[in-house]
């Protein structure tokens, strides 16, 4: 296979258009490849629809250095059909963009087609027209809500601390002013008494 020597390297699949993606080539099978992308995570490309694969070097290569630590898990299957079968009951995206893009729940795999359910319809997609597919990862809303609550509590706590610090500084300043004023008044009274004593 002409792509094996590119495994682990940064590549661009297809030069242009909505189906073009850049990323790290994770794996190559007989009729599909696995690409780790910034935009869509792990994308499985049907080799029949790939026009070109370019290795990224130079500036393109350096742009991906911060993305290197990613080591995502992916599905290994005998062929593209078996890969699709392993995605049943998952929320998936078929194709990256344009009118051929389909997003929904993968409900059924039939002879030469699959069924995607969205909020309104059941969509039958011929397997031949599937250029690539990716799994849409669900976000843990409870984790996100808990994290948001923690962030809000931290922000609230910090603002309270700031207000307390300001109040304390004001009280300290007022107390210092009072002490200085008391000291001045005491000095005045002492000076007045000493003057009276000298007159006597």
Image (cartoon, rainbow, N blue to C red):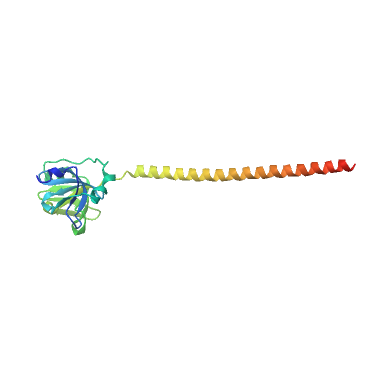
The residue positioned 26% from the left and 43% from the top of the image is 68
Whether 57 is drawn above or below 17: the answer is above
The residue positioned 55% from the left and 43% from the top of the image is 165
Side of 31 relative to 43 (left or right): left
Q: Position of residue 25 (x, y in %)?
A: 18, 45
User: Could you say which is closer to the camera, residue 128 or residue 13?
Assistant: 13
Q: Position of residue 7 (x, y in %)?
A: 16, 43
Q: Residue furthest bottom?
A: 99
Rendered image quadrant of residue 82: top left
**Count of numbered labels shown in the rendering:** 0
Q: Position of residue 96 (x, y in %)?
A: 21, 54
Side of 101 relative to 160 (left or right): left
Q: Residue furthest right?
A: 200
Q: Position of residue 113 (x, y in %)?
A: 12, 51
Q: Quadrant of the C terminus?
A: top right
User: Could you say which is closer to the camera, residue 23 or residue 18?
Assistant: 23
Q: Quadrant of the N terminus?
A: top left
Rendered image quadrant of residue 69: top left
Side of 156 relative to 8 (left or right): right
């Amino acid at each position: 296979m002409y792509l094996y020597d590119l495994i682990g390297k940064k590549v661009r699949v297809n030069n242009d258009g909505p189906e073009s993606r850049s990323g790290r080539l994770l794996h190559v099978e007989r009729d599909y490849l696995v690409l780790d992308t910034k935009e869509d995570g792990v994308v499985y490309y049907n080799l029949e629809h790939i026009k070109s694969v370019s290795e990224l070097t130079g500036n393109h290569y350096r742009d991906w250095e911060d993305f290197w630590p990613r080591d995502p898990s992916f599905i290994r299957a005998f062929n593209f059909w078996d890969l699709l079968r392993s995605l049943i009951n998952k929320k998936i995206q078929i194709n990256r963009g344009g009118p051929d893009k389909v997003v929904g729940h993968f409900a059924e795999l039939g002879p030469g087609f699959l069924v995607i359910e969205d909020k309104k319809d059941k969509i039958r997609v011929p397997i031949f027209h599937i250029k690539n597919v990716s799994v849409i990862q669900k976000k843990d809303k409870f984790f996100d809500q808990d994290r948001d609550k923690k962030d809000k509590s931290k922000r609230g706590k910090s603002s309270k601390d700031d207000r307390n610090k300001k109040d304390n500084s004001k009280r300290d300043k007022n107390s210092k002013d009072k002490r200085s004023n008391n000291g001045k008044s005491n000095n005045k009274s002492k000076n007045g008494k000493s003057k009276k004593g000298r007159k006597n």
